[in-house]
Amino acid sequence: DAKTTQPPSMDCAEGRAANLPCNHSTISGNEYVYWYRQIHSQGPQYIIHGLKNNETNEMASLIITEDRKSSTLILPHATLRDTAVYYCIVTTPTDSWGKLQFGAGTQVVVTP
Amino acid sequence: NAGVTQTPKFRILKIGQSMTLQCTQDMNHNYMYWYRQDPGMGLKLIYYSVGAGITDKGEVPNGYNVSRSTTEDFPLRLELAAPSQTSVYFCASTDAGVYGYTFGSGTRLTVV
């Protein structure tokens, strides 16, 4: 699986959009970009995933560059409950059993 | 629909004791996983299973055993507990399609 690079931490004001970058310059054609988050002491939570096109769901939006070498997770209106570690993972879904590798992620702190 | 259920939530073991961490999912997922997370670190894969009767080692399998007799259950066995096994253990499952993993809430284990 391709490796990802994320900033170790970032702050965001409550009510503002949080834009979380992720670099994955070695991504291959059949690899998806997944985002998970882990709120303190809880199990990781799936947020969103995408292959080429931008994706949106009730939690977030995912913007993938045209060359697919980087992506941005957008939390449109951050709340205090969005404070968590966010993980960007690149993997091939059908091969992903056992290969979901979590790096250090980005610690996001949402402040009032 | 309970998702992935882990028991117990907390446990203190003495060195050399044994225990089984229970994991049950009610989503009829074929793929199940055990991860451990040491303080301040990412998740590491211990064992995984792609279906009933099939298990395989992950990144850090030493000191652990698993079995998968049913689709729903994937218990993790610690035979001779060591302080190095002090960690938070997460169980996860997926249908191995395009969608993400569902994680349990974790078992916090301390070996003294």
Image: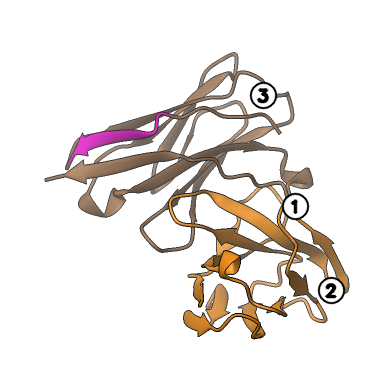
Chain colours: A brown, B orange
Report the amino acid beneath label 2: Ala
In the picture as drawn, the residue positioned furthest to the top comes out as A67
Callout 1 environment at 10 Å: few (<14), some (14 to 19), or many (20+)? many
Q: Is mark 3 on a helix, strand or loop?
A: loop
The residue where tag 1 is placed is A97
Q: Can residue B75 be seen in the rendering of this structure?
A: no
Residue B108 lies, in percent from the top left, at 48, 73
Q: Is mark 2 on a helix, strand or loop?
A: loop
The residue where tag 2 is placed is B52
Report the amino acid beneath label 1: Trp
Which residue occupies 73% across, 24% down?
A: A29
- Spatial separation of the CA atoms under disc 2 and disc 1: 14 Å
Q: Can residue B108 be seen in the rendering of this structure?
A: yes
User: Can you say whether B103 is above or below B107 in the image?
Assistant: above
Q: Nearer the viewer, residue B43 or B87?
A: B87
Q: Earlier in the sequence, mark 1 or mark 3?
A: 3
Which residue occupies 21% across, 51% down?
A: A80
Q: Mark 2 lies on which chain?
A: B
Report the amino acid beneath label 3: Ile
Residue A99 lies, in percent from the top left, at 71, 46
Residue A33 lies, in percent from the top left, at 59, 34
In the picture as drawn, the residue positioned furthest to the right comes out as B53
Q: What element carries label 1?
A: loop
Q: In this view, does A62 lie to the left or right of B83?
A: left
Q: Mark 1 lies on which chain?
A: A
Which residue occupies 50% across, 70% down?
A: B106
**Quadrant where the image shows the C terminus of chain A:** top left
What residue range appears in magenta?
A7-13
The residue where tag 3 is placed is A27
- Residue A62 is one of the magenta-drawn residues: no
Name the dominant secondary structure of the magenta segment: strand
Q: Do labels 2 and 1 share a chain?
A: no
